[in-house]
Each structure stands twice: as C-alpha cells, then as structure tokens.
Amino acid sequence: MPGVVWQQCIDRLQDELPSQQFNTWIRPLQASTDGQCLTLFAPNRFIKDFVSDKFAGRIAELVSELEPSGPLDVVLEIGATRQVAPTVTASAPVPVAAPAQNTFTPPPSSDMAPGVSGFAVSRQEPAAAPVPRDAPRENLRQAEIAGSLQHQNGLVENYTFDNFVEGKSNQLALAAARQVAENPGDSYNPLFLYGGVGLGKTHLMHAVGNALRQQKPDAKIVYLHSERFVADMVKALQLNAISDFKRYYRTVDALLIDDIQFFAKKDRSQEEFFHTFNALLEGGQQMILTCDRYPKEIDGLEERLKSRFGWGLTVAVEPPELETRVAILMKKATQARVDLPPDSAFFIAQRIRSNVRELEGALKRVIANAHFTGRDIDIDLIKDSLKDLLALQDKQVSLDNIQRTVAEYYKIKVADLMSRRRSRSVARPRQVAMALAKELTNHSLPEIGDSFGGRDHTTVLHACRKIKELRETNSDIREDYKNLLRSLTT
Ligand SMILES: Nc1ncnc2c1ncn2[C@@H]1O[C@H](COP(=O)(O)OP(=O)(O)OP(=O)(O)O)[C@@H](O)[C@H]1O
C-alpha cells in the first residue's frame, strides 16, 4: 500500500524536521504511484529543487524502509498545482488515498466557480442598500469608489529588503520574498506569510512591493489590510458599484493583503475575494498574503480559500532569536544615527523577546531618553528608560515562576525539580527548566544551579546543551519548550 507508506513517511519527516521546514517543503507535496515508482509532485520549481537537494535522500531511505513489498523508486516532479495540498498535522492526519486512481491527492475542490450573485450577506457585514441609478449619482458613485480605492497604493518606503535583517527565524520567508520580487506572478503565487504579531510579515510584503515598483515604476501595486478590503467591498455594494470594485482589483499587477485572518466569518467578502483570487492567479498577477496563523487553522474561513492559499508557497516567520534581535537593534540604531554599544544592544535584546515591534519600541524609548537627558546610551540609561517594562518582566519571569510553570506543565511537583531524583520523568523537565532559566533570566549558572536544590553550575550548562540538542532532534521537546516559552513570556 504505497499510499500508506507515503503517509508513514510524512509522519516520520514531521517528527524529524523543525515544523517550519516541514510545513514549507514537505507539506505541499502530493504523491501518486504506479506500484513501482512513487512520484512526488511539488507545486513549483522552488520547492521541487529544494526538496530534491535537501530531502530526496532521506525520503528515498524512508520509503525503502517502510515499503514492505520492496523498494520503490522516488521521483520528484512539478505537479498540477491546482490540487489540494495534503493536510498533515500531528493530531489529525487526513486520509490521502484515492484508491480508484491509485493517487494520494485529494480531488480538486468542486466549488470552483459559482456565480457571484445570489450569496447571502453575512451577519458581520452591513447589508448593502442599493442606490437607484441616475446620472449625477452615477458620477458621485464613480468618484467615491475611485477615491476609496486610490488610497490603497501607498507602500511604506523604508520597508525594503535592505532594511530587513536576516536571521534563522525569517530566512525562508526572506528567500521566498526575494524570489517573488524577481519573478512576480511566476511560481510562488500566492506567497503566504504567516506568524505572530510584529515579526516582519508586513515589512517583507512591502519589500516585495517596493522592489517591484523599482523595476517597473508604473506598476499598479496595491497594498491593503483585509479589513479595508471588506470595508471597500461593502461601500461598493452600497453604491451599486461592485463591478468597479471588481475591475479595480482585477487590473492590479500585484495585490498585497495583510492579516487575512480578518476575513474569517465574513462570507460575502470571502466570496468576493475568492473570485478576485482566481482572476489574478489566472492573469499571472502576484498576490502576497499575510496571516497570524497557518491557513488551515483559520476558523471561519471557507475550505476552498484555505486550499487555494496553499497553491503557492506558505512560509512561517518565527520570533527572532537573540543574535537576530541584537542585529536588528544595531541596524535600527545605525539608521537613527545613534551610537548603541554592543553590550547595550545585547542587554535590550535579552530582555525584550516577544517581537520586533516591541524591540523597536524599547529602542525608541531609550533613544528619546538619551536625547532628552543628553546622556550616552549605556546599560544604566537603558535600565532607567525601560524601568517599568523590565520590572514587569522580572516579576513575570523569575526562577520561581519558571519552576512552577514547568512543574505544572509536566504534572510533577516543584519539589521534584529540586530533588536528587534522576528518573527521566523528572530529570528531563528539570533540564528544560534550567535551560529556560538560562534563556529567560539574567541569573548566572551558579545561581540557577543553587535554585535547583544546590546543583553545580556544570550541571546547568550540561542541561542547557542537552536541551538545545534535543530541540533540534526531538519534536516533543521542541514543542514543549516552545509552549513553555510562550506561556512564560506572554
Ligand atoms: N527582520 C527585521 N529587520 C528589520 N526590521 C524588522 C524585522 N522584522 C520586523 N521588523 C520591524 O518590526 C516592525 C513590525 O514588523 P511588521 O509590521 O512587518 O510585523 P507583522 O509581522 O506584519 O505584524 P502584524 O501581524 O502585527 O501586522 C516593523 O517596523 C518592521 O520594520
């Protein structure tokens, strides 16, 4: 049963790879077989080349290990992209076999192109009040709708690739965005960027827009927030100008829509966007969409939209790690022509971990304070400037707090963390707690060791190294650590 083998192979890869890599490269693959050969279809060349370069060897190994009736050849091809990508999650793997065709690809969505009329207006959107047509009103309508749509051309000029700091957390998203800027409307359409707030999704989207505009100054590049799309659509309906609305969006060279999670439960807007999406895709016009979560996880979004969002390239933007946070601060300080000593940048980056927007906000406060008081930036000035923020954080992330949170998470007692017990069920959470203490507090290794029942600093160091290694290789630990970090810092 090669279908089962591919599913097992996916499960193994999901365990082996960091989720960002799995979601970007493995999740979009479709598989089919003739019994001798397993063909994997990638939605575009980018994914095909990357998979062939990085994962083909491992996939072939797994397939021959898992296929009981003998080895299968594995071939990678660029597939028909208009197919639904397999949904693979740890909790609910989707059955992928379609036995009649011996193909593991779910059939294309059947609701391809319903007419645009006759749909219900959802409760979230004001119903349109039709306006009778006459000449002056027609002019007003044209003027209003044009005015309403024109404002959307504004791109933030300094959101460029040059101003974007690359790090491990945004590497894939940056590479994909650059590719799109070089080949708009080609293989990665739509480019779907997702991740938490303030991590640079909007910046990257504008960077593509700015690059496109630089190559072609008269290109019609439209950026807007999804709420704006909804508001404009409602207005167009009220003014009886929905055809102008449609025309406007369908004649763009590139459409950038931010935070598409706001489409959730807005049925009428989703319907309209669905048709716009299809028209742009057919016309080879580039779309870039951002969202705060993976498309399949947006409640209240139609399945057909979710599946279309996966036709191009879906890439996560993760929170930046310490080195990237430092580099971002240094870059922003240079841009502001301010001298930020490296140890000061490091101090801020260590304390502000949530997202880049917060990091920028903290730096702005420090710079303002330096201007105001005429002092140079150093750690004392930073402590003064960010007193409230740091106090709040110290209170939140104490050793005590970490130990309680970890004990609760693993359902053990805080006393177990301090004890001499070495069973795996206690030792591993203890190591996780130590690694979190090192990452989230400014306590020294000996202080951390002390707080765990008087242990030596080398034990803490070993724990930190072990957990770092396990986070690379073991998906359970990776997940646990991520969950704990999130609950301790938000
Ligand atoms: N890697 C980076 N290099 C430089 N600046 C960055 C980087 N990442 C984010 N920023 C800056 O952080 C701020 C927030 O980024 P942005 O608005 O793009 O986040 P976002 O992910 O779109 O968040 P939201 O979902 O809240 O809209 C912006 O000023 C942006 O320039």
Image: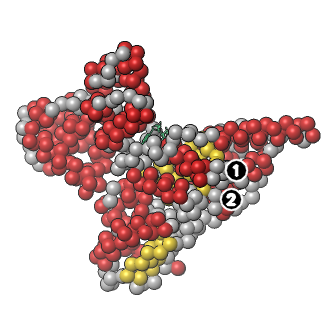
- Label 2 near label 1: C-beta < 8 Å? yes
In the rendered image, which quarter is residue 384 located in? top left
Please tell me which residue is depicted at 9% across the width and 42% down the height of the picture: 459
| Earlier-in-chain disc, 1 versus 2 | 1
Q: Which residue is mark 1?
A: 249
Quadrant of the drawing holding the N terminus:
bottom left
Q: Which residue is mark 2?
A: 279
Q: Is residue 136 visible?
A: yes
Q: Amino acid at mark 1?
A: Tyr
Q: Nearer the viewer, residue 72 or 161?
A: 161
For the residue carrying disc 2, how many other residues have a C-alpha within 10 Å: few (<14), some (14-19), or many (20+)?
Answer: some
In the rendered image, which quarter is residue 354 located in? top left
Q: Amino acid at mark 2?
A: Ala
Residue 24, percent from left and from top: 43, 59
Q: Is mark 2 within 8 Å of ligand 1?
A: no
Residue furthest top in the image: 373
Please tell me which residue is depicted at 36% across the width and 82% down the height of the picture: 72
Residue 358, percent from left and from top: 41, 32
Q: Nearer the viewer, residue 400 or 205?
A: 205
Please tell me which residue is depicted at 71% across the width and 60% down the height of the picture: 114
